[in-house]
Image (spheres, coloured by chain):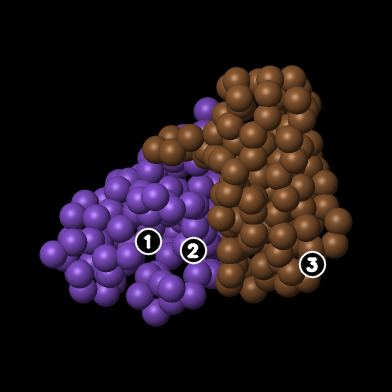
Amino acid sequence: EVQLVESGGGVVRPGGSLRLSCAASGFTSDDYAMSWVRQAPGKGLEWVSGINWNGGRTGYTDSVKGRFTISRDNAKKSLYLQMNSLRTEDTALYFCARHRSSGYDSFAYWGQGTLVTVSS
Amino acid sequence: QSALTQPRSVSGSPGQSVTISCTGSSSDVGGYKYVSWYQYHPGKAPKVIIYDVSKRPSGVPDRFSGSKSGNTASLTISGLQAEDEADYYCCSYTGTYTMVFGGGTKVTVL
C-alpha cells in the first residue's frame, strides 16, 4: 500500500524558515516524480514545486522561486521542501504527492498534509 | 503561471449530469495530454478521478468522464449522486517542469 506521510509543519514568524519532509512507503521511490501542493485557508489547490525521479529536474511556482527548494533522497525514500523567507501568504496545508510516472503527469497518491502557519 | 479557469460552482439533482469546464491556453491544457481532475473534500487528501485527459483510475466509477477540445478540458459527472458533492480541480502540465491547477469548482447535489 502506497503511503505518504508529511511532517515538519508548524508556526513560524514572517521571514523564518521551515523544512517539510515526506516519508514514502509502498513503492520504489526513484521510479516516480514527486510534488508539493498546498491549500491556503479559503483558497484552492496550488501546485508549489515538483522534482523528477532522480532530482535532476525541478520546478517551482513563481511565488516561491528563490525562496523554496525541493529535494529528494531516494535511499531514504523521502521528499523535502526547504522553505525560507516565509510570508504570511505561505500559510497553508501542504500536501506531498506522488506522480503517476517518472514525469510530471497526474498525482496518483497524496499524503494527508502538514499545516504551515506564518504569523507574527 | 495563471490558474486555469473553472466555474466556481455547478449544481444538479440526483441522476442528472453536470459538466465542469477547465480553460487554459496552448501553453498548458491545449499543449499537453497531461490534464487531470481531482475530487477534494477540504482537509482531506485529494483523489484523482481522471488522468491523461480522459483515463479513469481503477475504482473510479464510469459516470466520471473527461475530454478536451483545444484549450478547454471538461469533466462530466453522469447520474449525479449525493456522494459526488465535493470540490473538483483540474490540473495541467505547463512545460519546463511546472504544473498549474484550476481555481476549483464546488459541485452541489440538490
Which residue is painted at 50% across and 70% down in the image?
A: A61
Q: Colour of chain B?
A: brown
The chain holding disc 1 is A
Q: How many marks?
A: 3
Q: Is residue B38 left or right of residue B62?
A: left
Three-letter amino acid code at disc 1? Leu
Local SS, label 2: strand
Local SS, label 3: loop
Q: Dot 1 surroundings within 10 Å: few (below 14), some, or many (20 or more)?
A: many
Three-letter amino acid code at disc 2? Ser
Which residue is painted at 55% across and 34% down in the image?
A: B86
Q: Dot 3 surroundings within 10 Å: few (below 14), some, or many (20 or more)?
A: some
Q: Residue B31 shows which numbered tag?
A: 3
Three-letter amino acid code at disc 3? Gly
Which residue is painted at 68% across and 48% down in the image?
A: B36
**Do tag 2 and tag 1 residues touch (Cβ < 8 Å)?**
yes
User: Is residue B81 among what the camera can see?
Assistant: yes
The quadrant in which the C terminus of chain B is found is top right
The quadrant in which the N terminus of chain B is found is bottom right
Q: Is residue A14 left or right of residue B59?
A: left
The chain holding disc 2 is A
Q: Residue A81 shows which numbered tag?
A: 1
Q: Residue A49 shows which numbered tag?
A: 2
**Do tag 2 and tag 3 residues touch (Cβ < 8 Å)?**
no
Q: Is residue B63 left or right of residue B6?
A: right
User: Is residue A76 among what the camera can see?
Assistant: no
Measured as percent of width and height from the top left, residue A13 is found at 16, 65
User: Which chain is tinted purple?
Assistant: A
Which residue is painted at 58% across and 49% down in the image?
A: B8
Of residue A27 and residue B6, the one placed in the foreground of this image is B6
The nearer-to-camera label among 2 and 3 is 3
* Mark 2 and mark 3: Cα distance apart in space: 20 Å
